[in-house]
Image: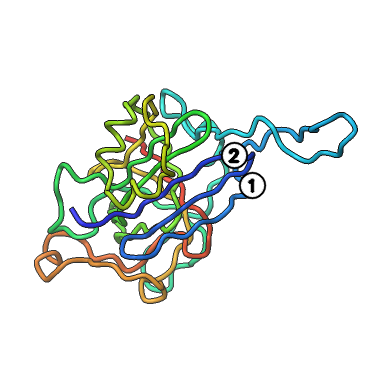
Amino acid sequence: MGRRHGFFQRIHGGRLTEVHRRAGEQAAEGRIEEAAYFDPGRPARLFGWLPFVSRGGARLRWPFDERGRDVLGLFAEPPPELGDGAGAATGIRRIAGRARPLSASGVASELILVDDTWVAPFWRVAEGVDFVVDREGQGAVVVSFGLAPLVVAVPERVALSDQIARLDPYTRRLLPAGADISGHGSRVRVLPGDAVEVWGVCRDLSESRRTFDLGGPADYRTAPRPARVIGDEDGTRLIIRVTG
C-alpha cells in the first residue's frame, strides 16, 4: 500500500485546529473557526469583573450515532446531482455509487479508502487515499481530499493503541508527543465496494491542480475512466455517507 493522506484534529485551549498532509506533500496546520461538528462552548470569565476572555466546554460533535445516522444534518439540503457528459455543470455537487480504489490494478480487499477515528470529546485522527465512485449508468468520478473528510457511517469501537499502530507512520507523526492513546475511540471507514454518497466541489480532471494515478492500459478494460473529480481544493470540506 502506498503513502496515505493523514489528518489530525484536536481542541486545545478552546480552539479547534487541523494538521493535514496529502501523501508526498508537507504537513500544514489550520484553525477551524466554525463547523457543524465543532461546539466552541460558552465564553467564560476568569474572574467576575473581567471581560469574556476564554472559552469553556469546547468539544467535537460526532457526525454519526451508533446506527450511522446523520445526526448533524450534513445531508439535509442536497446540492444538484452531478450529471454526465461533456460540459456538465461544476460547483458543489453530489454523486452516489460504489467506491473503489483509484487504479483498478490496485483493488485489494484489505485496502481502506478512508479510516477515521473520533476520540471523545477532543480529537480525531484520520487517513485515506483518493478513490473513485462508479455511478450506475453514468461516468466514474474521482474523490480527492486534502482536508479530513466527514464520514457518516456505522461506527466501530476500537482500542486506540491498536488503531494508531495500524496507521501510516507519516499519519502517526501528526499526533502530538505524549498523546494519550490508552482508551477507546469510534472508527468509521469507507471500504472498496461500499455504496456511498459524496458531496463536494466538482471540476474536470484537467482543471484540477492535483494529479491522479488512474492506472495503466489494463485498467481501461476493467473499469470506467473518470473525467471529473469531486474534491476540496477550494477549502469546502467533503462529506461522505456510507449508505450500504
Residue 34: image tag = 1
Q: Residue furthest front?
A: 178
Amino acid marked by disc 2: Phe
> Residue 125 at x, y = what percent?
40, 42
Mark 2 and mark 1: span between their CA atoms? Answer: 7 Å
SS class, disc 1: loop
Left or right: residue 163 versus residue 70 is: left
Tag 2–tag 1 contact (CB < 8 Å):
yes
> Residue 82 at x, y = what percent?
43, 58
Residue 38: image tag = 2
The answer to which of 69 and 59 lies nearer the viewer is: 59
Question: Can you say whether 211 is above or below 104 in the image?
Answer: below
Left or right: residue 20 versus residue 58 is: left
Question: Can you say whether 174 is above or below 39 in the image?
Answer: below
Q: Residue furthest left?
A: 218
Quarter of the figure with the C terminus = top left
Q: Residue furthest bottom?
A: 206
Seen at 37% across and 40% down, the residue is: 116
Amino acid marked by disc 1: Glu
Q: Is residue 47 visible?
A: yes
SS class, disc 2: strand
Residue 77: image tag = none
Seen at 32% across and 48% down, the residue is: 97
